[in-house]
Amino acid sequence: LAPQKRGKSYMVDLTAISAVRQGVDVLLVDLEMTKRQKARRLWGHYVGLPHPKDAGIISVPYFGDRGDICYREKTFRGAYTSSEEVVRTQKGGLRLNNGASIQWLHPQNQGITVRQLKHLIKEKRKGKDRPFLLIVDSPDYLGPEAAYANKDTHQMLGSLWGGLRGVSREFERCVVVGPSHTGRQSSKGEGSDADVSDSIQKLRHVTKTIFL
């Protein structure tokens, strides 16, 4: 949970990279960015280099001997994007990651329901029995099932988040991660109503909550 522009997507991207490096497949459902944008960002995380347009000399802060804040200039080259280098790195990564990989799902519309999403996941995971991490960024953009379309917000969110929890149970060895917005009030990360957008009741379906 975090306010807008706090870094939720960056956090789940780094979670995806950490998981795949430990041999866990990742299925990333992105309802905000295009596939090209997400691939570019993930690739930068994976190789530890910024996009070429962001490369150059930057000032890196550090603490001096007397506790004062100092700055050191450092040159960063951009992430390589040629097809040959990318393919070579990916092949090496598959060996190091025990065959684990990151797959994308980019539904055409943001109003996709959990039931529709579940069908797409089955198609994407067909023939695979490895444990996997499912990241939905962000569940706030999923649409309600037809039976809950005209219900109040509490019932609709309960159905949506309960459905995501059901996904983790239906697929063997699956963990679901979903970043969500906090309320408009200033968040202190105490788990109160002010910390959750729409309704705090959606946290009933969550196993673990992290506040940013």
Image (cartoon, helix red, strand yellow):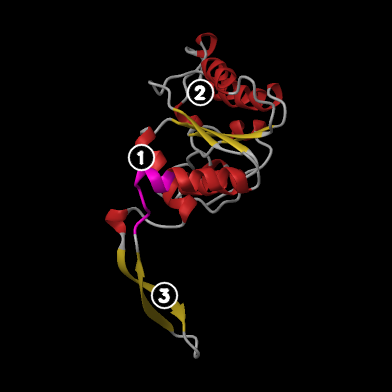
Seen from the viewer's position, the closer of residues 90 and 162 is: 90
Figure check: 21 above or below 150 = below
Figure check: 183 above or below 202 = below
The mark that comes first in sequence, 1 or 3, is 1
- Residue 57: give x, y in percent of width and height: 30, 69
Q: CA distance from mark 1 to mark 2?
A: 31 Å
User: Which secondary structure, mark 1?
Assistant: helix
Q: In the image as oriented, which residue stretches furthest toward the bottom?
A: 66
Q: Which mark identifies residue 76? A: none
Q: Residue at x 52, y 52 (%)?
A: 212
Q: Residue at x 45, y 85 (%)?
A: 68
User: Which secondary structure, mark 2?
Assistant: helix
Residue annotated with mark 2? 153
- Give the side of residue 12 with respect to residue 99, left or right: left
Residue type marked 2: Thr
User: Which secondary structure, mark 3?
Assistant: strand
Q: Nearer the viewer, mark 1 or mark 3?
A: 1
Q: How many marks?
A: 3
Q: Are marks 1 and 2 in contact (CB under 8 Å)?
A: no
The mark that comes first in sequence, 2 or 3, is 3
Seen from the viewer's position, the closer of residues 105 and 200 is: 105
Residue annotated with mark 3? 61
Residue annotated with mark 1? 37
Seen from the viewer's position, the closer of residues 11 and 41 is: 41
Q: Nearer the viewer, mark 2 or mark 3?
A: 3
Range shown magenta? 78-86
Residue type marked 3: Pro
